[in-house]
């Protein structure tokens, strides 16, 4: 599980994970204090796969179509600060909803 916050107005938090084509993942929103925290997933070519307000709850299952590094970006719609928690889990793992190895860059 990732728990973090946007500290300074205008900042974004970027999380990167490596995945293979055909992996089926699950995006699980754990917590979000307000209605303006945006989560966006980009494929290895920088193309947006989805954008979701974290207050809308889980995105659910989705399948990746390319091998490579994916970027998951958290930002604030109104450039204020906020805390949040989420996880991106591998639905095809032998361990149900195994947490992916995710790295952070702020």
Image (cartoon, rainbow, N blue to C red):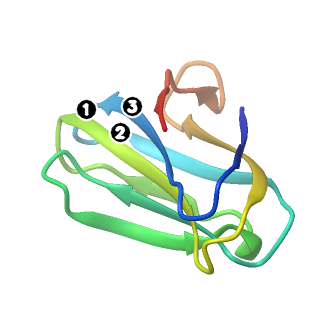
Mark 3 to mark 1: distance in Å? 10 Å
**Secondary structure of residue under mark 2:** loop
The reply to whether dot 3 and dot 2 touch (C-beta < 8 Å) is no
Label number found at residue 60: none
Q: Quadrant of residue 94?
A: top right
Q: Position of residue 96 (x, y in %)?
A: 66, 29
Mark 2 to mark 1: distance in Å? 6 Å
Mark 3 to mark 2: distance in Å? 12 Å
The reply to whether dot 3 and dot 1 touch (C-beta < 8 Å) is no
Above/below status of 8 relative to 71: below
> Along the horizontal axis of the image, is 34 left or right of 74?
right
Viewer-side residue, 56 vs 8:
8
Q: Residues within 10 Å of mark 3 (few under 14, many from 20)?
A: some
Tell me the residue at 62%/63% (across/down).
9
Q: Residue beneath label 3, please?
A: 17
User: Which quarter of the image is occupied by the N terminus?
Assistant: top right
Above/below status of 31 relative to 15: below
Q: Residues within 10 Å of mark 1 (few under 14, many from 20)?
A: few
> Along the horizontal axis of the image, is 5 left or right of 70?
right
Q: Residue beneath label 2, please?
A: 23
How many marks do you count on the picture? 3
Q: Position of residue 33 (x, y in %)?
A: 87, 64
**Secondary structure of residue under mark 3:** strand
Tell me the residue at 31%/32% (across/down).
19
Q: Nearer the viewer, mark 3 or mark 1?
A: 3
> Along the horizontal axis of the image, is 105 left or right of 82?
left
Extreme residue toward the front, this view = 8
Above/below status of 21 relative to 103: below
Label number found at residue 20: 1
Q: Position of residue 90 (x, y in %)?
A: 52, 34
**Secondary structure of residue under mark 1:** loop
């Amino acid at each position: 599980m990732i728990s973090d916050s946007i500290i300074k107005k205008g900042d974004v938090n970027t999380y990167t994970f490596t995945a293979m084509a055909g992996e089926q993942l699950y995006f699980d929103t754990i917590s979000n204090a307000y209605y303006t925290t945006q989560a966006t997933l980009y494929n290895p070519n920088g193309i947006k796969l989805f954008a979701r307000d974290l207050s809308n709850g889980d995105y659910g299952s989705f399948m990746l179509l390319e091998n490579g590094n994916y970027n998951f970006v958290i930002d604030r719609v109104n450039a204020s600060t906020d805390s949040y928690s989420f996880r991106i889990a591998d639905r095809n793992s032998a361990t149900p909803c195994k947490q992916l190895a995710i790295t952070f860059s702020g």
